[in-house]
Image: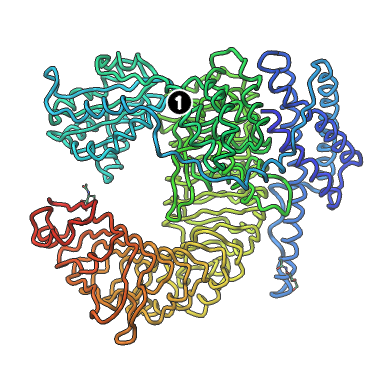
Amino acid sequence: MADALISVLLEQLTSVVYEHTKEAVTLVLNAEKDVESFSNKLKAIQAVLEDAEKKQVTEARVGCWLEKLKDVSYEMDDVLDEWSTEILRQQVEEKQEEEAENASVAKKKVCFPIRYDCFCFGQVNKAIHHHNIARRIKELNEKLTLIAAEKEMYGFHQSTKRGPDEQLIQRQKTTSLVDISKIFGREEEKEILLCKLLRESSQEGERFLVIPIVGMGGMGKTTLTQLVYNHEKVTAHFDKKVWVCVSDPFDENKIAKAIIESLDKNETQKSSIELETLLLWIKTHVENKKLLLVLDDVWTEDQTKWENLKLPVIMQSCAEGSTILVTTRKQEVAKMMGATNSMIHLDILNDKDCLALFNSIAFLDREKDESNEFEAIGAEIVKKCKGLPLIVKTLSSLVRYKKTKEEWRDVLNSKIWELEEVEEQVFRPLLLSYYDLAPTVKPCLLYCATFPKDHEFDKNNLLELWMSQGYLSWKKNHEKRRIGLNYFESLVTRSFFQDFVKDYKGNIIGCKMHDIVHDFVQFLTRKECMIAEVVEGANQRIELACDMVRHLTLVTPVGPFAFPTSFNNCKNLRTLTILDSRMTTISPSSILQMKCLRTLNLSGNILKELPRELGELIHLRYMDLSSSKALKELPDAVCDLFNLQTLVLDWCRKLEKLPKAMGKLINLRHLYVGCCNKLKYLPKEIGSLKSLKALDCFYVCDHGDEEGKDEVMKLGDLGIMDQIQGTLWIVRLGNAKDAGEVEKAQLRNKKHLSVLGLDFQNGNEEQRKSDEEILKALQPHQNLESLSIWYCHCTTWSLYRIKSLHNLRRVVLRYWKFCDLLPPLGKLPSLEILEIFSMHNVKKVGVDFLGIEEGIETGGILFPKLKDLQFVDMPNWEEWEGIIKDSFDITIMPLLSSLGIDGCPKLKGLPHLLHKITALRTLTIEDCAILERDYKKGMGKEWPKISHIPDITISGT
Ligand SMILES: *[C@@H]1O[C@H](CO)[C@@H](O)[C@H](O)[C@H]1NC(C)=O
Ligand SMILES: *[C@@H]1O[C@H](CO)[C@@H](O)[C@H](O)[C@H]1NC(C)=O
Ligand SMILES: *[C@@H]1O[C@H](CO)[C@@H](O)[C@H](O)[C@H]1NC(C)=O
């Protein structure tokens, strides 16, 4: 823990000394010396930290010493950050003065109005402030002297670890994903389970069965359950399957809602409805259906909670043979459900299966003969895993990157094994993996403790959070995102993360953390991270030592509520997350108590306004206000957050305007403003933010009715923002009239942009005649990988130079009102996914779609990489002509594996070309009356033409 913090701080110290002495901000003379002396002492301490971390488990006073060390380190971090912020403030001030001068040269003499009143220090104040910083540094330095002296009492050993960077680099080369799809052992349990699920007749006269799968964390309960849940026989046997992750706390409403959501995606709005109503809804929707309900990870033994859910009543109304599968760590849960008879106990894996699992990972990419040398040690390590598959997985991932036998033996003989405590019994192997992480990666892992169990991490979001806490290296010249990606990768390969979510390119974009790993990181951070539940009614008392809490997550099953003032004495908070916050107010005094905040998440709140005191949280780097339901504007003071890197505002449906002076946020890297329907425009100053890397949405303003024209960011202002990366949506493009202005946006120079969305809504009919011109002027860079075009009034395609986009992997077209021919896309060499929605005018899809210009082409492959093709909502589509005259020697869509047609009632048939596509595995037809009749499974007259496709779903049959 401490070493994680200190390695981050040391990097910061080094750069502070180096950078700040160059800067104009001179503190009282001795400050730099004090920093240097502090830094030297810290280095000496760092050398023994590894030993100290291990000793603290058995020696309480070592624990105390580490706590003191951490406090001083945190405080130093704050002081240094204040110092840096001071420098930033000067930079902003200079920039503004320069701009003002320029403006006054350009226009007539105008008095510059924006001075620093809110953050204002006059020269005198400034000097006092500087003195203050210098004094605090001196005090901290003295404190550390005492701590350093105390260290001698404990006789720590110096560690001889390699430097963090060296380690990281070495690992990077060998990383490849460990994603184990094969399950080792468990054949017997699987058979028993399948047998119970697929039972023909009722047993002992029961209409339904509850099957608890019981076993300790890390035993593979969920893995086994997933395996049978996805088994094809099980899928065929049940009418409805529902998977709900229950976890702790057991919340009946949440579970009922999750069931509903799983049964019908449309029913997500039922947020405020009573349990009774929810249950009734479920009952009517599963009546007489054969239902398989999985409740994953149940903890509660509380009989009343279970009874509230009334599942037995619901199950009685289902078809005979319906089943509830429950996974839990506790036998008591099975007892509570009255289902001990059908319980399946998952015991430890036998040695043989453990070894097989271990070998499958540890020797994944090793040469055969080389492996033999290690096998004996591997077998010894497996014995220590006590049959827990998770631990086998963790350790095998760990040794996989160890090159020498000595390193393997080190893992085997490590002292940490000898710890006796129960918690450590389970955590032992994890601790080992933890100690093996580079010190700079450790805090990144620990930060995950601020999220509740079963949270699905979004990779980008996680990187931004790490960045906000200062974990991603202070060094300049290093791309922070790159560093973050390496750290993430490093955690992935060590099995700290799992259940990966991947994007269309197969890159990991999200993941979860195994329960036991989560328990583990919470165990390590138990003093610093706190997850608390807001209790209804009065302000609750916080019993914990608030000073120590650095990261606070409030879970709020109740609401609406005001921010509880009882948390006001948590003065050292660096993270405040309010999950699903239905918060109505947060008082200025609460805000002012949280001056150390780096990260603030108030997503989902119902605040009408934010206190302007927010501007005083000078350390703040990450602010998530997304889905604020009532917020109309942000206080101008937000622009004083010079350190702010990430501002998340998407889904703020009431937000009308952003502060004008956003140009002051010189460190802003990520600005998310998607789906803010009321937002008319972005402020012009955003265009000048050199650090801005991510801007997810640009709003084209209808200039006509806007008074403050000068404040409006125009499309042309995007022209100088060639640094933006990732995804950009340009919306209300229908408002754009002037193709010249559009051209100035210079999309063709945005080479880091990989996803572009163009939404043409808005604008009157007259204006919309220029859609075609506008589209032409938006020609993107060749690196573009995904392109969506919505609500465009174009008719012809030849104008649009889409053909030159040869890196395009995905195209989505939606609602082209006047379009009667599909665009010729067959020649796009990289196109993998094509989705076409709501082309209401299209009657025929012909050879033009394939990209063949009549009479010219012979030979070649069309849609050479296409894997997934979807047509949705094409009410007038009648004919799909897919074959060209036989004389042409042309291959079409050779790799197509998934085809979906939904809402095309007039479509008369599928093209012959499907016959030739051997890759085709999935065909889905929904809401297409004629196709449903003619291609009906086993009966339709055209059925033989598609019967070779393995996975066919046709609605209405
Ligand atoms: C002000 O004008 C100067 C000279 O024209 C130019 O170099 C500078 O970039 C301008 N500064 C700002 C902040 O616009
Ligand atoms: C969900 O809503 C859509 C559009 O509102 C509707 O077409 C569809 O049938 C609904 N699905 C279900 C399962 O009710
Ligand atoms: C912020 O809170 C929302 C829910 O309220 C959650 O979905 C999101 O993941 C949180 N984000 C961060 C960065 O903590």
Q: Where, by quadrant of the figure, is residue 183 drawn? A: top left
- The answer to whether one can see residue 592 in this image is no
Q: Nearer the viewer, residue 220 or 543?
A: 220
**In this rendering, would 183 be left or right of 610?**
left
Nearer to the camera, 308 or 368: 368
Q: Is residue 787 above or below residue 176?
A: below
Is 219 drawn above or below residue 34 in the view shown? above
Residue lying farthest front?
369
Q: Is residue 911 left or right of residue 428?
A: left
Question: Can you name the residue that lies furthest to the bottom here?
Answer: 855
Based on the displayed image, in which of its 4 quarters is residue 734 positioned?
A: bottom left
Give the farthest residue toward the right. Answer: 29
- Name the spot of residue 425 as percent of width and height, x first: 54, 17
Q: Amino acid at mark 1?
A: Gly
Q: Quadrant of residue 363?
A: top right
Give the residue at x 76% y 59%. Answer: 94
Secondary element under disc 1, as helix, strand or loop, is: loop
Q: Which residue is mark 1?
A: 218
Q: How many marks?
A: 1
Height in image: 416 above or below 14?
above
Dot 1: within a 10 Å radius of its alpha carbon, few (fewer than 14), some, or many (20 or more) residues?
many
Q: Position of residue 26 (x, y in %)?
A: 87, 47
Question: Along the horizontal axis of the image, is 900 left or right of 694?
Answer: left
Residue drawn where x is 48% and y is 48% of the image: 509
